[in-house]
Image (cartoon, rainbow, N blue to C red):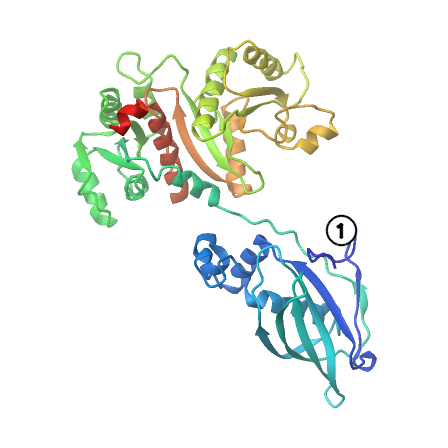
Amino acid sequence: MNPNGELGGEGHAAPIENVTFDEIAIGQSASLSRQLTVMDVELFATVSGNIDPVHLDAKFAADSRFQKVIGHGMWSGALLSGVLGTRLPGAGTVYVGQDLRFTRPVGLGDVVTATVTVREKHADKNIVVFDCRCTNQLGETVVTGTAEVVAPTRKVCRAAHTLPQIQMIRHDKHDALLHKCDSLPPVPTAVAHPCDESSLRGAVEAAEAGLIDPILIGPAAKIRSLAVTHGLDIARFRLVDVEHSHAAAATAVALARAGEAEAVMKGSLHTDELMAEVVRKETGLRTSRRISHVFVMNVPTYPRALLITDAAINIYPTLEDKVHIVQNAIDLAKVLGVETPKVAILSAVETLNPKIATTLEAAALCKMADRGQITGGILDGPLAFDNAISAEAARIKGIASPVSGQADILLVPDLEAGNMLAKQLSFLANADAAGIVLGARVPIILTSRADNVRTRLASCAVAALVAASRRPRIPTALAAE
């Protein structure tokens, strides 16, 4: 077994052969080694329920007795169990008792070797007593003790059981997104028609998180009644009384146009109803940019945030539309901290094919970027999805690309493709999502009744960061005064 705890070589499990009671000799020993990783600590915490922050929180652990994150003591004890169950005596062993003393902490990166040595044999019940010892990579003892087992009497030799692969599903990337807003003031946000529990609760929770300062727009009596029914405190929020959802959308846009709101948030009205007011030429929030939507996806199996656009506004965007759509996404990626966003322009294939219009559009967009018509990012395409997110897939196909495996932005062919891709990542890959509409005078938060709290807060966080990036910057000298 290697330091990572894997049996055998080349990824194949070695056969397991036990040692029967009659074959066991006094003084006989066996060992295995494993390196303690963050995943080990988190898995052990998940299985055992022991979530003591000294094992999981680096800041907390820095002020603890050992001044660092340490592994659970019983993680080392579990290694001893592994030796007894797979090495000596092996298959068929029944644990009777265990006595352990933990003499030194095990930190992340330490390699622990667990060794059991036969001390006694009792033939009447096939009992074997072992001395147990765990040492680290420096030879220091971290655990001592004894174990008592019933040894097997029947010889067993068989292939080791193949264990499932484990993928840790984390949500810390969305947490990092929320932390970016810690120093920002709440964004005045016009919430259009929050007349169901989901939309009203979303606004209240975002306010409690310090992300927005909601202006609730809709039938006042209905909103107050809804708040009472669901135990939501809205007393401190501005409430604008209008008759129906259409008036709420118009009022929300008017407040943003007048500068009273720096963001607009969709309530329980339909997206089309809100966006119709946003795009009105005379009274809406249009700019010279095409309005587009971006999903910010944090996928457990991908190392960086993945921006997918457009999956909610532009149904069949033209080449000209895509220039604006990709520029909106590049600008957002920069706000989120990506210095030079890499854009993968998706199609079904990675070669130019006159019969597939999106491959020609991809080539045109790349050339437009070369000529400075799209700025701030690195574009490549056409790329099939696998080549966009996997450098290995691109290598196998002979594609040399500065974007493959490093894509920050996926520009999809049309709304249907983008919507399906984003929802597949959410529901099949356990991705966390946030959504924002760009290209208008203010960011627009489109929420869904199916969105969980994390998604709603993350969407508000993205809007807060965009709004902050648009505020006039105070010169350093003036700020100091």
- Secondary structure of the residue carrying numbered label 1: loop
How many marks overall? 1
401 or 301: which is nearer to us? 401
Left or right for 80, reference 268: right
Question: Is 309 drawn above or below residue 45 in the view shown?
Answer: above
Residue 404: x %, y % from top left: 63, 28
Please tell me which residue lies in front, 317 or 30.
Answer: 30
Residue 110: give x, y in percent of width and height: 62, 58
Residue at 82 percent of width and 74 percent of height: 155
Q: Which residue is mark 1?
A: 11
Task: Please name whichever residue, 373 or 280, is drawn nearer the observer in this view of the structure.
Answer: 373
Number of residues whose C-alpha sits closer than 10 Å to that of mark 1, classed few (under 14), some (14–19) or many (20 or more): few
Rendered image quadrant of residue 217? top left
Q: Position of residue 260 (x, y in %)?
A: 22, 25
In the depicted view, which residue is nearer to us: 12 or 55? 55
For residue 178, side relative to residue 189 (left or right): right
Q: Residue furthest top?
A: 371
Residue 178 showing in the rendered view: yes
Which quadrant is home to the N terminus?
bottom right
Task: Say which amino acid is labelled 1.
Answer: Gly
What residue is rendered at 52% in x and 25% in y? 341
* Residue at the image point whose x is 26% and y is 15% from the top: 283
Residue 69 coordinates in the image, percent (x, y): 51, 57
Q: Residue furthest bottom?
A: 124
Indicate the quadrant containing the C terminus: top left, top right, bottom left or bottom right. Answer: top left
